[in-house]
Image (cartoon, grey):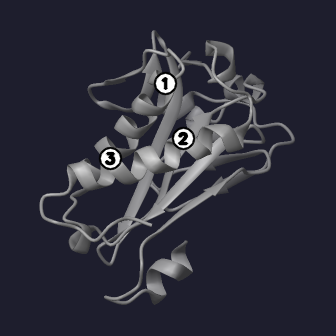
Amino acid sequence: MQDFTDRRGPATEDEIWVLEHEPVFTLGMNADPAHLLAPGDIPVVKVDRGGQVTYHGPGQLVVYPLVDLRRAGLGVRDLVTALEQAVIATVAGWGIMAATRPGAPGVYVAEAKLASVGIRVRRGASYHGLSVNVDMDLGPFGRINPCGHEGLAMTQVAALGGPREVGAVAGVLVPELRRSLEAHAHESPRPFP
């Protein structure tokens, strides 16, 4: 992501990367290490995104929108809103009522967090992005204060009646994200990949 962002030029096409990570805790640039309670055998990696500490692992959909924000007509808040709204629209198709919370980026169902957002903007382009818990072991979230919030409950799509396959969620989320990015642009952007 960093290399792609550093090498991109004015004509570089935007990309949306979709993946799963091996088990890892990541600490954002200004994360308080006190939120990392008991990592045990799971690696801890400092990364150059915003936000505190989170967990990534198999069964979680990770989406990295690599977008030239200026060309797309998007501000940072527009990007975060587009990511959140894409998740909300995606899970609504499975009858899951999700929402955002003021001052707490991400997507929530009742009192539990379903999706986390952590981005970085450099040279006018975004990287890092979004993680959606699909069907994973949520236990490692108990070893941290997720996103810096002590006792924050986590949930996942499968437990709420949605699909268990990361690919099935990605197949709906990526088109929703494209629509959401275009809807939040302040000018006429080029279509998203």
How far apart are the alpha carbons under marks 2 and 1?
Answer: 9 Å
Query: SS of the residue at dot 3?
Result: helix
User: Residue 32, can we see it?
Assistant: no
User: What residue is pinned by disc 2?
Assistant: 172
**Residue 29 x/y as whole percent:** 47, 56
Name the residue rendered at 32%, 45% in the picture.
82
Q: Does the CB distance between marks 2 and 1 fall below 8 Å?
A: yes
Q: Residue furthest left?
A: 187
Front-lying residue, 193 or 105: 193
Query: SS of the residue at dot 2?
Result: helix
Q: Residue furthest top?
A: 110
Name the residue rendered at 28%, 30% in the picture.
103
Position of residue 121 in the picture relative to residue 93 (left or right): left
Q: Earlier in the sequence, mark 1 or mark 3?
A: 1
**Badge 3 amino acid:** Ser
**Would you place residue 91 above or below residue 66 in this image?**
above
Q: Earlier in the sequence, mark 3 or mark 2?
A: 2
How far apart are the alpha carbons under marks 3 and 2?
Answer: 12 Å
**Badge 2 amino acid:** Val
**Residue 151 x/y as whole percent:** 56, 15
- At label 1, counting other C-alpha atoms closer than 10 Å, the crowd grade (few under 14, some 14-19, many 20 or more) is few
How far apart are the alpha carbons under marks 1 and 3?
Answer: 15 Å
Q: Quadrant of residue 141?
A: top right
- Label total for image: 3
**Badge 1 amino acid:** Gly
User: What residue is pinned by disc 3?
Assistant: 180
**Would you place residue 167 above or below residue 3 in this image?**
above
**Residue 122 x/y as whole percent:** 36, 73
**Would you place residue 56 above or below residue 69 in this image?**
above
Q: For the N terminus, give its image quadrant.
A: bottom right
Position of residue 95 in the picture relative to residue 141 (left or right): left
**Numbered label attached to residue 93:** 1
